[in-house]
């Protein structure tokens, strides 16, 4: 089993189709929707994690492609270097997924890679360059 993270871009006529149900039922994939922008009469976009066997993932991606859904695979990951971090919160302010948080009682930055949609907004926001992109994952 493996998990891939991807952005999906839907044409207008696919935004109301049950493609997630199809991926689960017909290809045995687990789908975790991390972000979605679906509005009536407009093209849609979502970020998802897909988990399954390599063969099932490949079939699921072919299914999406055959239905006009563009898939952009994320091939990078985000690394937080705590040694350079001053817990200023600038990255938290731009992180819409909730992957970066500062909470009581210690008010230290925490990073949850499972929630990260790899938008890289935090990389630009960090004044100390404590967040980097790992291009090898
Ligand atoms: S890349 Fe940074 S800002 Fe974007 S979701 Fe991941 S942690 Fe949050
Ligand atoms: S912006 Fe940089 S220094 Fe500030 S909390 Fe985030 S990682 Fe740490």
Image: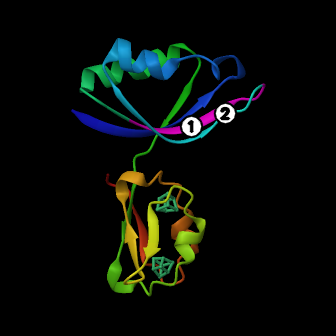
The residue closer to the viewer here, 40 or 79, is 40
* Residue 42 magenta-highlighted: yes
In three-dimensional space, the C-alpha distance between marks 2 and 1, rounded to whole angstroms, equals 8 Å
> Which residue is identified by label 2?
38
Q: Residues within 10 Å of mark 1 (few under 14, many from 20)?
A: some
Could you say whether the residue bearing mark 1 is in a helix, strand or loop?
Answer: strand
Q: Is residue 122 above or below residue 115?
A: below
At a point 44% along the width and 87% down the height, the residue shown is 86
Question: Quick one: which residue is furthest to the left in this view?
Answer: 1
Question: Quick one: which residue is furthest to the front in this view?
Answer: 105
Q: What segment is highlighted magenta in the picture?
A: 41-49
Question: Quick one: which residue is furthest to the bottom in this view?
Answer: 86
N-term mark: 2 or 1: 2
- Could you say where residue 63 lies in the image, as x and y percent from the top left? 45, 15
Query: Mark 2 touching mark 1, by CB under 8 A?
Result: yes
Quarter-wise, where is residue 113 in the image?
Answer: bottom left
> Which residue is identified by label 1?
46
């Amino acid at each position: 089993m493996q998990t891939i993270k991807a952005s999906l871009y839907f044409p207008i006529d696919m935004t109301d189709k049950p493609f997630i149900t199809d991926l689960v039922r017909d290809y045995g994939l687990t789908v975790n929707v991390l972000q979605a922008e679906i509005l009536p009469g407009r093209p849609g976009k979502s970020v998802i994690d897909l988990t399954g066997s390599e063969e099932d993932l490949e079939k699921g991606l072919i299914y999406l492609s055959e239905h006009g859904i563009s898939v952009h695979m994320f091939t990078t990951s985000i690394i937080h270097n705590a040694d350079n971090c001053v817990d200023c919160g600038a990255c938290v302010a731009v992180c819409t997924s909730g992957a970066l948080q500062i909470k009581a009682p210690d008010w230290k930055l925490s990073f949850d890679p499972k929630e990260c949609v790899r938008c890289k907004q935090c990389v630009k926001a960090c004044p100390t360059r404590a967040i980097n992109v790992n291009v090898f994952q």
